[in-house]
C-alpha cells in the first residue's frame, strides 16, 4: 500500500482559490492512478477528480469542471488539486486516494483535509 498525506485545506471566501497537495510514500508512485474525493456532512463520499498513472487522462465531476484541475508531479511523488472559483457547496473534507494500475477500486486513502468556503 502507498501512504498518502494531504495538505493545503483551509477557510476561503467564495470565489477564492486553494491548492491541495497529496504526498505519497511507500510504493512506486508512478504505478498508481490518483484521485481526489470529498465528503460533505450528511452526504456520501464523491469522486471529484482523477488522473491516470501516466498523467495522460483526467476525469472531473460535472460540478467542478472548469474550476478544478488535477495534476501530478512524479518527481515529487505528489498529486495536486487546484481549486478556483470556490463555492460554499465545495465545503467538505477532501481525501486523496490511490489505485494501483489494473485494479478497479481506490485502496489507499489519506486522512483528509478540511476545505470550508464561506459565502
Image (tube, grey):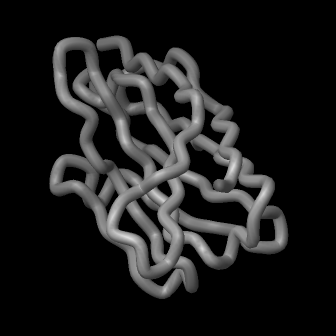
Which quarter of the figure is the C terminus placed in? top left
* Residue 41 horizontal side relative to residue 36, left or right: left
Q: Position of residue 91 (x, y in %)?
A: 34, 22
Q: Which is nearer the eye, 70 or 2?
A: 2
Q: Which is nearer the eye, 114 or 31?
A: 31
Q: Residue at x 48, y 37 (%)?
A: 95
Q: Residue at x 38, y 19 (%)?
A: 117
Q: Quadrant of residue 9?
A: top right
Which quarter of the figure is the N terminus placed in? bottom right
Q: Quadrant of residue 74?
A: bottom right
Q: Position of residue 76 (x, y in %)?
A: 82, 63
* Residue 48 horizontal side relative to residue 80, left or right: left
Q: Residue at x 64, y 37 (%)?
A: 6
Q: Position of residue 52 (x, y in %)?
A: 47, 77
Q: Residue at x 58, y 28 (%)?
A: 111
* Residue 89 horizontal side relative to residue 32, left or right: left
In the displayed structure, 79 sits above or below 74; it is: above
Q: Residue furthest right?
A: 75
Amino acid at each position: 500500500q502507498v501512504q498518502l498525506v494531504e495538505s493545503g485545506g483551509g477557510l476561503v471566501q467564495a470565489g477564492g482559490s486553494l491548492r491541495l497537495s497529496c504526498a505519497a510514500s511507500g510504493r512506486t508512485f508512478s504505478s498508481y492512478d490518483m484521485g481526489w474525493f470529498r465528503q460533505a456532512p450528511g452526504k456520501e463520499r464523491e469522486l471529484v477528480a482523477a488522473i491516470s498513472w501516466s498523467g495522460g487522462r483526467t476525469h472531473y465531476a460535472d460540478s467542478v469542471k472548469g474550476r478544478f484541475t488535477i495534476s501530478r508531479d512524479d518527481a515529487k511523488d505528489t498529486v495536486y488539486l487546484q481549486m478556483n472559483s470556490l463555492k460554499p457547496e465545495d465545503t467538505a473534507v477532501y481525501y486523496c486516494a490511490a489505485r494501483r494500475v489494473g485494479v478497479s477500486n481506490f485502496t489507499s486513502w489519506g486522512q483528509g483535509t478540511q476545505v470550508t468556503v464561506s459565502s
